[in-house]
């Protein structure tokens, strides 16, 4: 049966300050041509795209109460149910410098420290939401105070309740998260390389590691590989999606857009092939703009879907 209800969990939200400039030179003054400031964080980005696709989204995680306004405004705009735990302090600001040639330099700050009391309030919220929701997207980095093991324990608990958990994180959180056996993970090739400890340079290398991760109990491993496309390995088969060449304006949020597409396709009972095609098309459209969301017309999306080839791999 298909559902429109989904919970996205953002443990370490950020205000994204994006600046466009010709070229970044370290150690000197760099003048930015144009800038935007908006509420972000991986799970929040996923929620934004899911809402535009037609999902009924509930957002949760930790939110600093001192500068929550832009977040609250966004949640209203996407008609998201706001179940964020308010904590003391300011949400971090992450700086993204986007050069004319498409290179993005991310300067990510650590985020708000959360207390044991904050964490327990989130746990209560998560398990209340689990009574009425089957899909959970847990995405992004962990704030100071939340260990990788603690995050993994939520994945385990939700999976034990037969929830579908899509987990998208990196470093220690990804390592611990894989052991908790989420229903799906979506690392990019860099994150998967860090996980395995050596560079993965081809789709075949990525697939081999995806199979190792599946053997540990993760049902679906989706690896985004930039212009090399996206592979999706599960028990049935491995598919590879190849997006068309598009002008790259900014890659910010492209991975989150892919996650939203994967989640939505599955929620709507689409086939694996159709889901991957949709998610890859959404992600390809995402890199042609600055900012997250799909302000594109449905016709544009349909046109992009037709240009994404999906084949069995290898």
Image: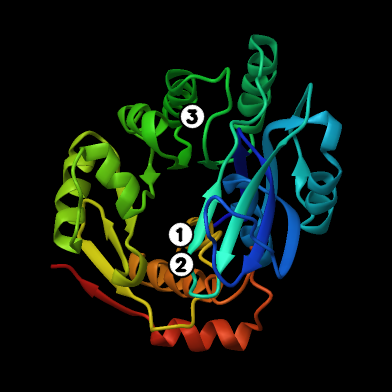
Quarter of the figure with the C terminus: bottom left
Q: Residue at x 32, y 62 (%)?
A: 225
Q: CA distance from mark 1 to mark 3?
A: 19 Å
Q: CA distance from mark 3 to mark 2?
A: 24 Å
The location of residue 313, given as percent across then percent down, is 17, 68
Task: Report the disc number at residue 160.
Answer: none
Q: Residue at x 34, y 70 (%)?
A: 273
**Please, is residue 285 above or below residue 261 in the view?**
below
Scheme of colours in the image: rainbow
Tag 1 secondary structure = helix
Which is nearer the N-term, disc 3 or disc 2? 3
Q: Residue at x 75, y 55 (%)?
A: 37
On the image, which quarter does residue 12 sit in?
A: top right
Residue carrying label 2: 279
Q: Residue at x 18, y 55 (%)?
A: 207
Q: Are marks 1 and 3 in contact (CB under 8 Å)?
A: no
Which is nearer the N-term, disc 1 or disc 2? 1
Task: Report the disc number at residue 158.
Answer: 3
On the image, which quarter does residue 195 sit in?
A: top left
Q: Is residue 230 left or right of residue 49?
A: left
Q: Are there few (<14), some (14-19), or many (20+) residues within 10 Å of tag 2?
A: many
**Please, is residue 59 above or below residue 279 in the view?**
above
**Please, is residue 269 above or below residue 303 in the view?**
above
The location of residue 253, given as percent across then percent down, is 55, 59
On the image, which quarter does residue 67 sit in?
A: top right
Q: Are marks 1 and 2 in contact (CB under 8 Å)?
A: yes
Q: Nearer the viewer, residue 271 or 305?
A: 305
């Amino acid at each position: 049966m298909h559902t429109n209800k989904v919970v996205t969990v953002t443990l370490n939200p950020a205000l994204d300050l994006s600046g466009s400039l010709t070229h970044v030179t370290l150690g000197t003054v760099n003048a930015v041509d144009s800038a935007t400031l908006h509420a972000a964080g991986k799970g929040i980005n996923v929620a934004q795209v899911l809402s535009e696709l037609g999902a009924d989204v509930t957002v949760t995680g930790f939110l600093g109460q001192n500068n929550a306004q832009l977040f609250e405004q966004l949640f209203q705009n996407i008609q998201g149910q706001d179940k964020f735990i308010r904590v003391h302090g300011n949400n971090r600001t992450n700086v993204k410098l986007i050069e004319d040639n498409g290179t993005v330099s991310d300067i990510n700050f650590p985020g708000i420290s959360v207390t044991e009391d904050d964490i327990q309030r989130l746990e209560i919220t998560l398990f209340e939401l689990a009574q009425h929701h089957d899909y959970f997207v847990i995405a992004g980095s962990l704030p100071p105070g939340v260990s990788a093991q603690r995050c993994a324990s939520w994945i385990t608990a939700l999976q034990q309740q037969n929830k579908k958990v899509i987990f998208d994180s990196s470093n220690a959180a990804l390592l611990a998260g894989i052991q908790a056996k989420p229903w799906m993970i979506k690392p990019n090739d860099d994150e998967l390389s860090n996980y395995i400890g050596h560079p993965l340079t081809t789709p075949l290398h990525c697939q081999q590691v995806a199979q190792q991760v599946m053997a540990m109990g993760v049902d679906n491993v989706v690896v985004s590989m930039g212009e090399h496309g996206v592979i999706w390995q599960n028990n049935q088969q491995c598919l590879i999606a190849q997006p068309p060449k598009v002008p790259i304006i900014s890659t910010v949020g492209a991975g989150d857009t892919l996650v939203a597409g994967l989640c939505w396709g599955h929620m709507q009972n689409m086939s694996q092939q159709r889901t991957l095609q949709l998610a890859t098309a959404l992600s390809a459209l995402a890199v042609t703009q600055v900012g997250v969301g799909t302000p594109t017309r449905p016709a544009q999306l349909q046109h992009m879907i037709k240009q994404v080839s999906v084949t069995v791999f290898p």
